[in-house]
């Protein structure tokens, strides 16, 4: 078993929706800052984190914001050669999650690894033995969605408090949400 631990990070609304028409159903500036902070911050300043995403999530990031800065971007696709041609050279394009874990395992400079969506990649990561924590922003509202977060197995993953993650209710405009952390026990 490799030493790589996977963290998932997602924002979902009450019906567990995460996306619609290839983008996010909401605009939450501070939630986005939380995502950037959690996926970027490192304890060891000589290291960097990795973000692992499906090809459609890559496509959903506005061109000017990708690759996500100060992070190693790993994109999963069944069409590695085609996607490689369309992405900058510093983006790692791989055919699956196990290949991503092997890649990360082979690099000494990666501190933590974040699975950032979408549905399939979340499910595959959650079922993977290397999955450790799920950082889920729980939005207290329903939005129309066509993409959903997979069911969390509550026998395996338990709600925990984590230092640095605010426990109190967050509010942006008329949208309330909580930052939750589930850990595999
Ligand atoms: N709310 C959130 O936190 C959040 C986070 C991320 C994304 N989103 C939203 O979710 C939507 C995108 O997510 P999605 O679930 O539709 O797509 P996705 O998981 O990002 O990407 C799907 C693609 O991943 C590749 N893939 C799937 N299974 C694979 C496998 N077994 N091996 C290798 N590659 C595989 C395929 O790429 P190819 O077709 O190239 O082969 C597939 O088309 C957007 O609306 C986005 O805004 C929301």
Image (cartoon, grey):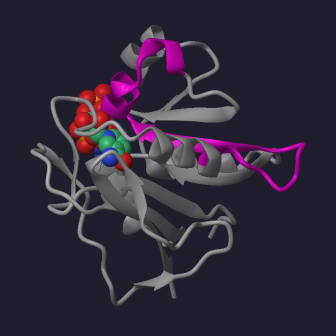
Above or below: residue 78 compared with residue 142: above
- Looking at the rendering, the quadrant in which ligand 1 lies is top left
Question: Which of the pair 102/124 is nearer the observer?
Answer: 124
Q: Residue furthest front?
A: 173
The x, y position of residue 127, in whole percent, is 37, 69
Instruction: Give the extent of the magenta segment.
Output: 39-66
Q: Residue 4 sits in which quadrant?
A: bottom right
Residue at 57 percent of width and 67 percent of height: 166
| Residue at the far top in the pictured view | 85
How many marks on residues? 0
Among the 4 quarters of the image, the one containing residue 146:
top left
Residue drawn at (33%, 85%) of the image: 154
Which is nearer the eye, 46 or 170? Answer: 170
Asked whether the viewer can see residue 77, the reply is no
Q: In which quarter of the image is the N terminus?
A: bottom right
Residue drawn at (45%, 38%) of the image? 29
Q: Residue 70, how many percent across, how many down?
A: 70, 31
Image location of residue 164, percent across then percent down: 67, 66
Quarter of the rendering containing residue 47: top right
Left or right, residue 32 beside residue 163 = left
Is 50 colored magenta in this rendering? yes
């Amino acid at each position: 078993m490799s030493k790589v631990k996977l963290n998932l990070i997602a924002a979902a609304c009450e019906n567990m929706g995460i996306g619609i028409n290839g983008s996010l159903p909401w605009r939450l500036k501070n939630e986005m800052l939380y995502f950037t902070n959690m996926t970027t911050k490192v304890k060891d300043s000589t290291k960097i984190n990795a973000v692992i995403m499906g090809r459609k999530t890559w496509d959903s990031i506005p061109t000017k914001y990708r690759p996500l800065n100060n992070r190693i971007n790993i994109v999963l696709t069944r069409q590695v050669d085609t996607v490689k041609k369309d992405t900058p050279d510093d983006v790692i394009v791989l055919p699956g999650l196990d290949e991503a874990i092997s890649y990360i395992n082979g690099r000494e400079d990666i501190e933590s690894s974040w699975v950032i969506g979408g549905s399939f990649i979340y499910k595959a990561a959650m079922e993977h033995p290397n999955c450790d924590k799920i950082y889920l922003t729980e939005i207290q509202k329903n939005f129309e969605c066509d993409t959903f977060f997979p069911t969390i197995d509550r026998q395996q993953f338990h709600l925990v408090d984590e230092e640095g993650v605010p426990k109190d209710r967050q509010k942006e405009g008329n949208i309330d949400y909580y930052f939750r952390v589930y850990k595999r026990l």
